[in-house]
């Protein structure tokens, strides 16, 4: 069984037992999280629930860790104008472990 969930403006295909890295969620490590925005649910029998059928489904998970992504260097440059700018960015992330899919 799998589900397609949306969180942080991105979509993820998850199964029970998976560990995924998503945008930061509020909550302590070890606390439970519930994803209500389920876009599709694939059952073991091959049946696919989508749209209004999957709207009532929920995915439960627990927070494993809060972390930060690898640093990305942003470099801006304009030739002949003596313009250079270097900037770095690290995105905050949360790792969650998927528990069960309630469809």
Image (tube, grey):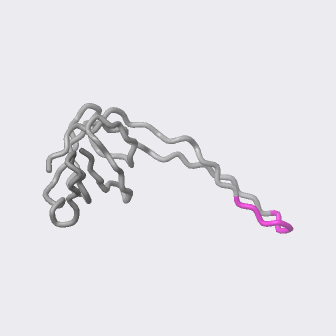
Residue 77: image quadrant is: bottom right
Q: Position of 94 compared to 44: left or right?
A: right
Q: Position of 40 compared to 79: left or right?
A: left
Residue at the (43%, 37%) spot, across then down: 67
Judge whether 53 appears above or below 2 on screen: below
Residue 49 image offset from top left, x and y in percent: 20, 59
Residue at the (22%, 37%) spot, across then down: 99
Residue 13 image offset from top left, x and y in percent: 34, 49
Q: How many marks?
A: 0
Question: In this view of the protein, which residue sits in the foreground, 49 or 96?
Answer: 49
Residue 18 image offset from top left, x and y in percent: 32, 37
Q: Position of 91 compared to 14: left or right?
A: right
Judge whether 77 appears above or below 95 on screen: below
Residue at the (27%, 39%) spot, across then down: 98
Residue span colored magenta: 76-82
Quadrant in which the N terminus is drawn: top left
Kindly give the residue lying farthest to the right in the view shown: 80
Residue at the (41%, 43%) spot, across then down: 93
Query: Is residue 74 part of the magenta span, yes or no?
Result: no
Question: In this view of the protein, which residue sits in the foreground, 70 or 80?
Answer: 70
Residue 80 image offset from top left, x and y in percent: 86, 68
């Amino acid at each position: 069984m799998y589900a397609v969930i949306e969180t942080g403006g991105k979509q993820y295909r998850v199964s029970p037992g998976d560990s995924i890295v998503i945008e930061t969620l509020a909550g302590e490590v070890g606390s439970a999280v519930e994803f209500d925005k389920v876009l599709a649910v694939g059952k073991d029998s091959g049946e696919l629930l989508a749209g209004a059928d999957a709207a009532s489904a929920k995915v439960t998970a627990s927070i494993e860790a809060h972390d930060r992504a690898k640093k990305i260097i942003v470099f801006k440059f304009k030739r002949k104008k003596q313009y250079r700018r270097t900037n770095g960015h690290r995105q905050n992330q949360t790792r969650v472990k998927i528990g069960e899919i309630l469809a």
